[in-house]
Image (cartoon, grey):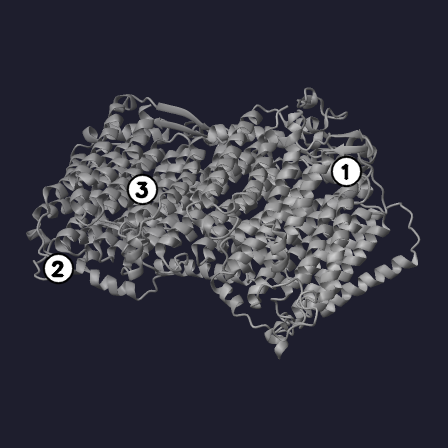
Amino acid sequence: MQLALIVLLPFIGAVLPALMIRAGRNACAIATFTVTATALLILLVQAPRVFAGEVLHFRAEWLPSLGLDVNFFLDGYGFLFAGLILFIGLLIITYARFYLAKEDPMGRFMAFLLLFQGAMVGIVLSDNILLLLIFWELTSLTSFLLIGYWSHLPEGRQGARMALIVTGSGGLSLIGGMLLLGHIAGSYDISVIITRGDVIQASPYYIPALLLILGGCFTKSAQFPFHFWLPHAMAAPTPVSAYLHSATMVKAGIFLLGRLWPALSGTDAWFYIVATTGLATMVIGAWIALFKDDLKGLLAHSTVSHLGLVTFLFGIGTPFAALAGVFHIINHATFKAALFMNAGIIDHEAGTRDIKRLGGLVHLMPIAATMAVIAALSMAGIPPFNGFMSKEFMLEAAGHTAWFGLAFDPTVAIIATIGATFSVAYSLRYIIHVYLGPKRDDYPHQPHDPPFGMWAPPALLVVLVVLIGLFPNTIVGPLLATSAGAVIGADLPYYSLSLWHGLTPALFMSIFAVGAGYFLLTRHSRAVTFRERFYRPEAKEIFDNAVAKIVGWSRTGTWALQNGSLQRYLAAMTGMALIGGYGAYLGASSAPGSNPMLPVPALAVVGWLLLVGACAAVVILHRERLFTLVLVGVIGVIVSLGFLYLSAPDLALTQISVEVVTVILLLLALNFLPKKTPIESPMPIKARDGVLAVLAGIGITGAVYAMLRRDVDSISAFHLANAYGGGGGTNVVNIILVDFRGIDTYGEIIVLGIAALCIVALLDTAMQGASGRRIANWQVDMRRSADRHPLLLVVGTRVMLAFALVVGAYIFLRGHNDPGGGFIAGLVVAIALIMQYMASGFAWAQRRAGLDYHSVIGWGVLVAGLTGVASWLFDYPFLTSWFDYITLPIVGTFEVASAIAFDLGVFLCVVGSVMLALSRLSRVGRIAEHLDVAEGPMDVDPSLHPNGPPSETRPTSSVAAQ
Amino acid sequence: MSHWLVIPVILPALVAGILVLALRHDILLQRITSLASTAACLAVAIGLLVQAAGGAVDVYELGNWPAPFGIVFVLDRLSALMVVLTGFLALLVLLYAINGWDRRGRHFHALFQFQLMGLNGAFLTGDLFNLFVWFEVLLLASYGLMLHGSGAERLKAGTHYVIVNLAGSTLFLVAVALIYGVTGTLNMADLAVKIPAIPAADQALLQAGGVLLLLVFGVKAALVPLHFWLPATYSSTSAPVAALFAIMTKVGGYAIIRLYTLAFGADAGEAAWLAGPWLLPLALLTIIIGMVGALASRSLRWLVAFAVIGSMGTLLIAVAVFDDKAMAGALYYLIHSTLIAAALFLLAELIAERRGQDGDRLALKPMPAQGDLMSGLFFAAAIAMAGLPPLSGFIGKLLILDGVRDNASAPLIWATILITSLLIIVAFARAGSLVFWKSRTVEASRESSELATRHYPALPVVVVATLIAATALLTAFAGPTMRYLEAATDQLMRPTAYIATVLGPQPVQEPTLAASPEVSP
């Protein structure tokens, strides 16, 4: 439980600084400090058991099916890292309290810092590699926030993004690697994985897993060629640089190398990839560091170099080298964090970090200077400081490493020595060019030593640097032994923690490095000139260009595809349907159907020719909108006839009434469209669409043909058999609609209703705003009849109305047994009503109808729905129909079915929808054409003026007057 | 008998009827009614989920006609889950919308309830043609909602939306006709029984129908190259509608999962796993097009819309391998991506509102009002969408990567998912850094200072926060969630009990599961 608590404390505690900042900066810092101190305390309590060689575990189930569980374990290695993270965390919090300016939001900073801390501790204590991945990505995210903390600085933003992208992509690679690794090892638990090195290395997935994992480690730990993000991350406030980008987060990569060392190391692939990368990084990082004038830039590249050193040591693969790596992790954390804080002090007090503008600070800042000198000497690997010892170990290990596997193979040793030389040079430069030399009088600020709170944290580290150097066995002996033991997993190799090992080759390499390093520094300006002769790839530029290019390509590509043309979208869809349909058809077995071909009567041929002709005419004449509509009407009629011919009178009736209504509504809508459409597509696009259309037509024809040529046992047999007995009717189509598949019908009438509501919503909104003004200013562009509401039409439709309503009622009532039903009846009645509206004008007729068609739709939906619900009363499912035969005197025996109530709902919905649509369209028309509501049913009403119309009532529409 | 199973469909329909009939003039009454109905749907859905969690499949025979002759609604773990997800999302979206959006056009609430009806119907139905009907209800209601509030850009996108989807509906009919033409049935369980016995002579027609139907569902699910309608539609419509549409793409995904495990699953003979070879390459393309598009986007909403396409690609990849583990992962990802897409669409509007004129565009403007709050929400939502820990996107991605492991194309799938993940990270990092960081370098304008002093209602922000919190809960309770989803997958991949419940005991079935079919009362 304690283990989980160590990880959770910083996460939970992150709330504290965010709140406590309201009580002041000190309260905020103290709260943060307390959180970290508590976590550290809990960790330290475990120390005796860890040092006794015990491995502590915490296990909780999270997502067992994936293998993701909240498993933590604490062994020496984890203890070392957790201790470093929390201990240095304490120092950083103290330092940051004094470093941050008043106007910096400290609460946020401390909260982010704690979140980061929690994630980092999570990484080092995780016993589950998937859990580790989560914490891994969390460090990338928190680091993103911390680097971008000063978000007004472009360097901060760019550095944050670069770090996120580089470490984030490493994280993605790590995801793949971890999933592979867990799969090979048969467990996602690290404590299990590190015992299965032989299984893992024998697996064919070993190499891909290794590469992917290394991708994660190398990006995180800024190994060449992914090192470039780290210097740019230095845009962060210095406490962040010291903490994340020197002491902890960048160590996550090498932590993982060490953690998985028993499982992955020891192969040629491991050696050549890891050791080479490490060595290259060490030398390149050190070389660049030598030429950085920015103190933090110098330290950043030095960090890169030292991370390379540790990577190199782990890569060698021998237990001794691994031990040396662990040792250097400790040492580097101490002197480098101290140096970063030192650089922060200089920046803070002298106002610049530019080495060229510094020098002679020893006279002004003696305390800072003392610390800097000790830490930098340790970094250079000068005795008696701790850096010397681990560097000796490194050179020793390098001396025993054969690159080509030869007996005498000094390549590695030579390169390592060169790296050490550069390292000495830049370390000495930090001392000599910054602190030594004459005092200057052009510092941006007058430098002086910082307040105690700022120098105490690095001082503590510097004390450690000295103590570890002088009394290594006392101070770090046990820690090193347990932690290295945990990495190696076997007995420790022989090593001696002391400054003097006799006259070993490593000592001579070391001496050479110091001498050569100093010499190089004395020739620094010449080295600069030398370096500037060569082309140096500027990583940031390359990176920025790459990102810009990728964004550019994605823009080009995306907008080239997504060009806003409906035609293209439909072409893509049709094309895909063709590929899918034909592809699947041709990919499977088929045989022609066996139904006999029927004779073709002449009538059918005529109908067919008409249909084909009308379709072809639409294609040719589609720019003439009105004419096209007429043709569409023709097509509809022929389709209705086709239904009739194929013995589907219900369909025919429906189709023909739908045709009528549609054409009328479309006519109203067409009024507001240009009467002709312009030619928009160039020939190639027309050709493309033509080919697609023809292929699609062939496909549909083929499918219809194939289906008509075969029989299938279908569920309709059941419908035929049960329509009368179970549904109480002889018109199977109607029984299917209102009974067998009543819910389909219910859905479809709702679709109709929604369509009408959409028209209302669309047109009512369109009447407001810009489009509303456009309609209001509409210029009438067509000649209108002088007699808008002709007498004959009015009288004729009046007569027709009664007939039509009776027909509607008749069709409605007989629907259960003969062609008809609510849907068709609704359409018929709607047509009857529309005729009235056409004859006398919508508004005039509407006043007399006195119906809001919204309500009609609402009633329709409710009546149909409640009819369905009513069956619940009798404990039957929704829409169960009931019927019985009732005998009344005079009338005789007739059937009563609940389906008729449902059909009534259908009827209402249809009438309501059609009329509502009509009302809105005609309303727009009335507004656009500035028409008043007609006063009478017809323009010329003989009954009012038996002696002929008075002249002033003559129609005087503006157009008619022309 | 129990009628709970039809309530999620019937209740919104009746409520919508009342809204149109009697309440259309009073917005307050509409809001109360609409909220009550949506909350009731959610409550019923949760009850159904609890019932389905037991493992029994429940069937409701509409009109009291037995399947396959009548239409049945079927409740299993997956359909229950989808109905709950719909209810939860709808309730939150509605809470967001009543803050003023619903006034900007007419009939918002009626259309919203109809939309709810269509969604629930699509998730519950066990009949292929009935599914078509729900698709139509969905399409029309969503078209109305999409245009809600109007505007030229919205009208154009709406026209594209409705035409493309009507073309899809036409294709649906063609495909259903082909399938009916050789099987003679429309009930999905019955299809599962009939399809294995389809003779070789009819296979070509059957499979052509099957693949065309896949494409129809692909139109809804924004499968490339049928996705073109989505970005403009989602980015131009109002935020609450776009958020509700987060579940619309899932209808397509759901239909694919349902039909191609049930009717074209392991037992489908020659047509077994028909969808896989078609779906996988298209899904891979989808994720690429989506994530690249996100990177290319010049406004927040386009960014989110393309991210939705990308996430549909991820989801469909996991579906396409038709493997138990991957399917369970896909279902988890489905929940995740619905929640987070909705959150991001709503958030995009909140941010845009606080940036002023053209606030949606990814151009340099002063810091949005309530900058800290907005950036915090954006950061969390972006993390979830980009699949970074600790939110559910990461878990979903891990589950999918883990699930597709055994597929022959696993390396390709892994590479595609991981590399495109990077693209979306870059896209969100760039957008967030521009809107919340770089904006600090811009002097406050008159507009921005006016915006900064304005009062913003809390409810919409709470809604967004709730959605993001839901993804956090989905992460924390990933274990129990996955147990449910694995059980749901088990029902999907071995639908014997489903078929037996819908059709009654079948003569030829595997002895293992068919031994004790649960027949509903």
Residue that appears at 53% across and 54% down: B147
Left or right: residue A936 compared with residue A239: right
Disc 2 marks a residue whose amino acid type is Pro
SS assignment at label 3: loop
Query: Label 3 marks which chain's residue?
Result: A
State the residue lying farthest toward the top: B516
Residue for badge 3: A249
Residue for badge 1: A735
SS assignment at label 1: helix
How many residues crowd mark 2 within 10 Å: few (<14), some (14–19), many (20+)? few
Where residue A494 appears, as percent x and y from the top left, is: 30, 30
State the residue lying farthest toward the bottom: A962
The quadrant in which the N terminus of chain A is found is: top left
Q: Earlier in the sequence, mark 3 or mark 1?
A: 3
Disc 3 marks a residue whose amino acid type is Met
Q: CA distance from mark 1 to mark 2?
A: 94 Å
